[in-house]
Each structure stands twice: as C-alpha cells, then as structure tokens.
Image (cartoon, grey):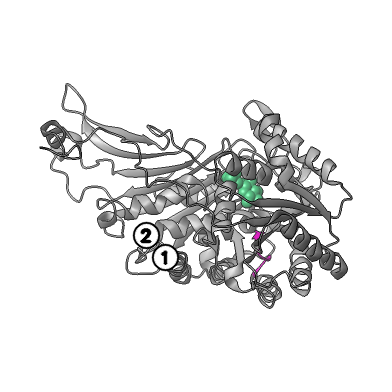
Amino acid sequence: MPDAADPTLAEVVLGRPRNPAPDASCRFDQVDGPVTIVIFGVTGDLAGRMLMPALAALYAGGNMPENFAIVGASRTDLTDETFRQRMRDALREFAGADAAVFDKLAPRLTYQRVHYDEPASFTALSAYLDDLSQARNLGGNRIFYLAVPPTAYEAIAVNLAMAGLADESKGHARLVIEKPFGRDLATAKILEQALHTRFAEHQIFRIDHYLAKETVQNILMLRFANAIFEPVWNRRYVDYVSILAAESIGVEHRASYYDHFGVLRDMFQNHMMQLLSLCTIEPPSLFEAELVRDEKSKVFRALRPFTAASLAENLVLGQYASGLIGGQRAPAYLDEEGVPGDSPTPTFAAMKVYVDNWRWQGVPFYMISGKRLPEKRTEIAVQFKPVPYSMFREIFGDHIKANRLTLRIQPDEQVSLTFQAKAPGPMCLRSVTMNFNYYQGYEGPALSAYAKVLLDCMLGDQTLFWRQDGVELCWRFLAPMLGQPDPNRLFLYKAGTWGPQEAGKLLAAHGLTP
Ligand code: BG6
C-alpha cells in the first residue's frame, strides 16, 4: 500500500502542489514561564504607537505566556485606571483594535510612577514588582524596556541595578534599548561602560527594528536555505549591489533629535549596516545569535575604511529643499519646525562601499537613504554581471541586459528576478521579471517588527539584536564622515526628487538611476 506521504506519479513529474501550507512545526516558540514587562516612558509615542499594539497582537495571537503583567512606568502621575484609558486610546488609534480585545488585556496593565534619576523611586519600584509578583504569581522574570530618550538610559540602568533589579538569581532581568547607541564611537563606548558595569551582555537587547522586518529576516533564508543563489553570490557573478531606504516623510515632529543626528547616524549606523551585513555575511554554521553576529562583525571589520580622498569621491550628502510630493507641497528641511535656519544636517546620503574580503573584493555596494524622496521604498538589488560572451551578437548586438535579483523589503514585500527571454514571434529578446509576493499563498500568523522583537526578548533570543562589537565597528567605519559637512559638499535636492544630482553621478558610474 502506498503511504499517503508518497508522491503520486503526477507529483513526481509535475512537482508537488505549489505553495503548500507550512507544516505544523512552523509556529512561534512559546514563552516559557511568567514574565513582567516594565515599560519606562510609557506615556511616550513609541509605547502608544508601537509597543502596546505589538503586545496586544502577541496576546491576541496566543504568544504571551499564561501569566504576565505589563507595568507602565514614567514620570507622569497616573492611576492604573488613567493609564489603562491611555493605552485603550492608543490601541484604538494605532492598531484599530476594538474595545473587546483591550478589555481582556486591561487587568494585566498596572502603573507605577518613577523618577528616572531618583534611586528611591527604583527601590519603590522593586518593592512594587515584588508585591505584584507575589499577588499574581508572576515569578522573577523581568524585562525592562527603555522607551525613553537615550539620555535617560544610563540613569535608569544604574538605578535599576542599585535597587537589585539587574540581579538574575530569581529569574532573568533583561534591558531593552533602542538606537541611537551613542552619537559616535566615543559616546557609544561611554554608554556601553555605563550599561555593562550593571548588566551583562546577555541581558542587553539592543533593538534594530529593521532586523525584525519579515523580509529582512528572509534575506538569510533566501541565501542559505536555497542552493541556487550562493554559488553566484560573489565577485565572480555580482556586478554591484544597491541598498536603498527611501522615505517620503520628512523629520515630522522629531526635529530636535534628527537635527542632532542626521541621516548617517539615524539610518546608516544601524539599519543600512544591518542590511549590508545580511547581504554579505558568510553562512554561519548554525542560525544562532552568537554565530550570526560573529559573521556580521567579520563583515564590519572588512569594510574598506574611507580616507579623505575616497570620501570626496564616494560619498554624497544632501539636504531637502521644498518641493512637491504626491502633489502636496513639502517644506524645506530648514523650514521644518524646530530646525535651525542654518542647519548643516544631511537628510540624504549615497555612498559607495567596498567589503575587502575574498568573496566581495572589487564589488561596489551603493547605499542610499534619504527623507522626502518621491516614495517609501526599501529594497536591495543584486545586479549580476552580463554574460561573458554573446552568441546572439549578430542578432542583438553585443549588449545583453544582465540578471537582477531584487529583494523588496517595503512597502510591498517581494522577491523578483529579472532575466532575458525570447519575445513571442520575431527573434527579439525582452527583459522579463518573475515575482514572488511574500505573503502570497500564506494565511498563517505573522508578527509586526515590534511584536517579533518583544517575543524574542521574552524568549531570550538575541539573534535579531545588535551586539556591542558590531555597534562599535560601525561607528568606527562611519567616523570619517560624521564631522560637520563642508557646506560646499552638502547638496540641496528638491523634496519629491531622488536626491541631489551629484548622487545620480555617483550611481551613474554603474548605470544605476536612484
Ligand atoms: C527609524 C529612524 O529608526 O527608522 C526614522 O529614526 C526612520 O528616521 C525610520 O523614519 C524608518 O523605519 P521604517 O520602518 O518606517 O522604514
């Protein structure tokens, strides 16, 4: 008797049905044991816009442990009830969640007022958490999410530790922080010393929300769970790679932060470097936090350092002037509320980067990111070399377009491969594209980037988080370009265009158009 799992003759010849559903083993890991999540800065934008919707989604999807509590902490004087009301409003506004979802979650939410620089406030917090644990049987696992400005990281970490809350004898104590991790190498080291004397590296979860985006995670799956890409994923076959993170929005309400950081610190030191590393790392022997992050650090170490001369040639910085985006007038960066009228902060950067190792020697990586570009688009294009010799030259001439693999990360998540095919009818070639839409044929659960980050943090899996050595290596690499830009080399571009013309020239060397 054939086994039901045996393929039929038709399946052998024609293949198994396309897009079979993932099997039962494809599910999220379950969090083991109870946990208390303390969110500092809970009245802020990040908590309402991202964290609460993510926690509610994890809860609704059955990803939270049986027993958990979410403790809001901030300087504002709130009662449990007024705190819940705020969170209810945030969920309605940012996640469109109905009241019924929140009603189930609400009893898990409590509030404790904390002054970040007052040790006594943390002693009180510690006693409060102990009482809560006892009353609700929450055990000793705790996550401290610092949704506060980075200037408050050190005080909170120090005071947590002084109140005994970094201690792991009764359960884990994890500290979650968001970028920026410093403003340059020196300040990143200062921050690291402040955190590390109180928390060990395995307790520190440094978020890069790009790493938790579905299609960013897919880069490693695509590269290393398929046999057909790796053999051509190197200098012999790849002509260049471009990594684009375009945004149509401006600085919004974050001018005071943004003007101090600019595009190099805001996007390159973190998200762009992670995208670059995922495209270029060697396969680790296992998909495990330390092994994956070891490989990333090797790539960061192999980045060719910039000199003053190579910077002038390979880096273009820009700042947006007023213009039209989608028919709407957008103000110049200098006219945004909170931006000094003579600010030299770049809102656009394009750079050509090399990874000096055996695999990538000589392959340029073009990295481009900017605000107020025509559309929101994040994508990586791997441009392959043309065929070495064209047997069709008598018919089509010497030039045959080369293949391109595009990994579209947002807004529409897809992988597409462009190749040449004969046109039906006359002897003509045409470029055609095979598209894979990431969610096509899939109806199972998915997680937003913040939900994934929170889940991994509860699971103690640091694969999608920055390790300190990576942070420092990237700051070191970017250091030569972090000084005040030469005003003659900060190029204006109209909002709604693809950046300054000078960037076009940098890319045109390879026939790229931004
Ligand atoms: C943040 C930057 O880290 O990423 C913002 O601070 C930027 O300036 C944002 O807008 C982009 O993230 P996403 O997920 O919208 O691509």
The rendered magenta stretch, by its main secondary structure, is classed as: loop
Local packing at callout 1 (Cα closer than 10 Å; few below 14, some 14-19, many 20+) is many
Res 433 quadrant in image: top left
Local packing at callout 2 (Cα closer than 10 Å; few below 14, some 14-19, many 20+) is many
- The residue that mark 2 highlights is 363
- The residue that mark 1 highlights is 355
Q: Is residue 402 above or below residue 298?
A: above
> Which of 169/291 is in front?
169
Going by the numbered disc 2, the residue's amino acid type is: Val
Q: Residue furthest top?
A: 425
Estimate the x, y position of residue 511 in percent, counting from the top left.
39, 45
Quarter placement of the N terminus: top left
> Which of 100/349 is in front?
100
Estimate the x, y position of residue 414 in percent, counting from the top left.
41, 38
Res. 320 visible in picture: no
Relative placement, left or right, of 363 versus 95 is: left
Q: Is residue 456 above or below residue 373?
A: below
Q: Residue at x 77, y 66 (%)?
A: 156
> Which of 205/25 is in front?
25
Question: What range is drawn magenta here?
Answer: 176-184
Relative placement, left or right, of 435 versus 93 is: left
Res 265 quadrant in image: bottom right
Q: Residue furthest right?
A: 77
Q: Secondary structure at mark 1?
A: loop
Q: Look at the numbered discs 1 and 2 and tell me whether their residues touch, using CB distance below 8 Å.
A: yes
